[in-house]
Image (cartoon, helix red, strand yellow):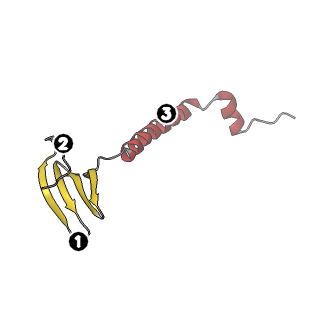
Amino acid sequence: MGSAPNAVEQVVHRGPGPRGAALKNLANRLFAALRRRIRVLAAPRARALRIEQSIALGERRSVVVLQWEDRRYLLGVTPQAVQVLDARAASREMVQEPCDGVLA
């Protein structure tokens, strides 16, 4: 008994046709654009605030180099206070001089 092929069988045997190909092309382009957009949104962002270095000076005392946007801060940190010891433009390199272990 030969029955007429249904719509699914026709698409499988003949392919999607010109409109189907256009829809598939449009869906592929939309999917590619969506992937690019997600990649841009998921890209890691530069942090504006960053601790570059921290050195412990004893029990709960430390010196911290903190970078914020285009500035670099040298901070003295204790349980009671945070004090700015120096502030410079971040583009200037901080010179590391040998330390004899004595802080002025």
Circle 1 sits on which residue? Answer: 80
User: Type of residue at label 1?
Assistant: Gln
Viewer-closest of 72 and 5: 72
Q: Residue at x 32, y 47 (%)?
A: 45
Q: Regarding mark 1 in the picture, which secondary structure is present there?
A: loop
Q: Residues within 10 Å of mark 1 (few under 14, many from 20)?
A: few
On residue 25, which mark appears?
3
From the viewer's perspective, is the residue at label 2 or at label 1 nearer? 2
Question: Which image quarter is the N terminus in?
Answer: top right
Q: Residue furthest top?
A: 14
Residue at image location 54% in from the left, 30% down from the top: 18
Q: Earlier in the sequence, mark 3 or mark 2?
A: 3
In-image side of 11 versus 93 (left or right): right
Q: Position of residue 75 (x, y in %)?
A: 19, 58
Residue found at x 30% / y 64% = 59
Residue holding disc 2: 98
Q: Could you tell me residue 91's position as x and y percent?
A: 15, 41
Q: Residues within 10 Å of mark 3 (few under 14, many from 20)?
A: few
> In the rendered view of the protein, which quadrant contains the C terminus?
bottom left
Mark 2 touching mark 1, by CB under 8 A? Answer: no
State the residue lying farthest toward the right: 1
